[in-house]
Image: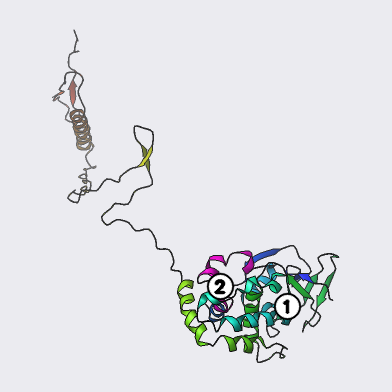
Amino acid sequence: MNTLHLENQVSFDFLFNQTRTKMLHSGGGTVSLISHQVASGLEPGEFTRRKKDAWNSLNVQRNLALSFDTGSMAFRPSDSVLKIIYSVYQHNTVCSVLENRIRLDETPVLSLPTKCSLEVDQSRHKRPIFTKHHHTGEIMRHMYPYATLPCFTLPLTDPGLLGIAAYTLDRNTVSYRDPCPFDLVQQFRSVWRTKELVEHSKVFYKKSRTPPPSPPRRRRGRQLKSHKRKHDDEGHARLSKRPRIDETASYPSPPRQRPQRDVANPATASASITRDILALKRKRAASQVQDCPVVHWQLVPVANKGLIAVKIPARTVYK
């Protein structure tokens, strides 16, 4: 059990083929993170710029990612590492000038891979946890209350940020867990309440609040451009303008209703249909461009009242 396991070799099942890299702390505006930035020697706004780097990341199995996001699981650095972090906190929280602080990440002892234990909120997890040895491939099952869990090593994650995650877990479970040899919550809070740290925290709060990007503004009175593209003389594509509709344009009038014909008298109905056909032909001929002389039709009445005779004009001869 003294062999150190990797952070991605712990899972809720015996499969270890779905890992996920996630940020340990996604936001830097909490009280604990602001206090850590001041006490660990970071510059204002440095955590916001570097929060996506490897020092603030965890490579864990996908079925455990949500547990780390909600704070029900955390990798806790060893007590020896936490005591070194606490000593750096003590020095930096009484500095009246930010430039007089020492950086936690430049401490030689903390530059080595961090030895951690896996802390579990036992009020929210009671299912078995599996671990896999990265050399032998041996898989072990650990039952509640997980007293047989091995220690882990995290070579890339910052020990101070791991300590803040463990501090959050201990703070939320302090009422029903066994006391640890190094009381993380009590010790960290004792050095975070100095007047120097409270004064320096104001600058860090301003740097951690980054406003969201504003949407692009459109000039007043400028028309929206359509998605249809036209090409100019040089072959470049340009957006076409949508034509405006004249406000004074009149709407088309509804279609006229034809008068009803008397179907009782066949002769009258036939004559009415013939007149409508001739009127429609004259209307079409008048609306079209004439390429030849216009020939007018002449109606000649005949003895039969139900028929209309049409006189055929003479043939036109072109010279």
Q: Name the residue under label 1.
A: 118
* Residue 139, horizontal then vertical, whole percent: 83, 70
Disc with the residue nearer the chain's start (1 vs 2): 2
Reading the image, the residue beneath label 2 is: 42
- Please name the residue shown 71% across and 84% down the image: 122
Left or right side of 270 for 154: right
Horizontally, residue 254 falls left or right of residue 179, namely left
Residue nearest the observer in this picture, 268 or 58: 58
State which quadrant residue 61 falls in: bottom right
Instruction: Tell me where residue 305 appears, x and y as whole percent.
Output: 16, 30
Q: How crowded is mark 1: few (under 14 residues within 10 Å), some or many (20 or more)?
A: some
Foreground of the two, 176 or 110: 110
Specify the label residue 313 is tagged with.
Answer: none
Q: Which amino acid does label 1 sit on?
A: Leu
Q: What stretch is highlighted in magenta?
A: 36-58
Image quadrant assignment for residue 150: bottom right
Locate the N terminus by quadrant: bottom right
Mark 1–mark 2 distance (CA, rounded to whole Å): 27 Å
Give the x, y percent position of residue 249.
19, 48
> Please, which colouring scheme is shown?
rainbow
Q: What residue type is labelled 2?
A: Leu
Task: Tell me if residue 71 can be seen.
Answer: no
Q: Seen from this angle, which residue lies furthest top?
A: 319
- Label pair 1/2, CB-CB below 8 angstroms: no
Local SS, label 1: strand
- Residue 107, placed above or below residue 281: below
Residue occupying the point 46% across, 69% down? 210
The location of residue 108, given as percent across then percent down, is 69, 72
Report helix, strand or loop for mark 2: loop
**Quadrant of image for the C terminus:** top left
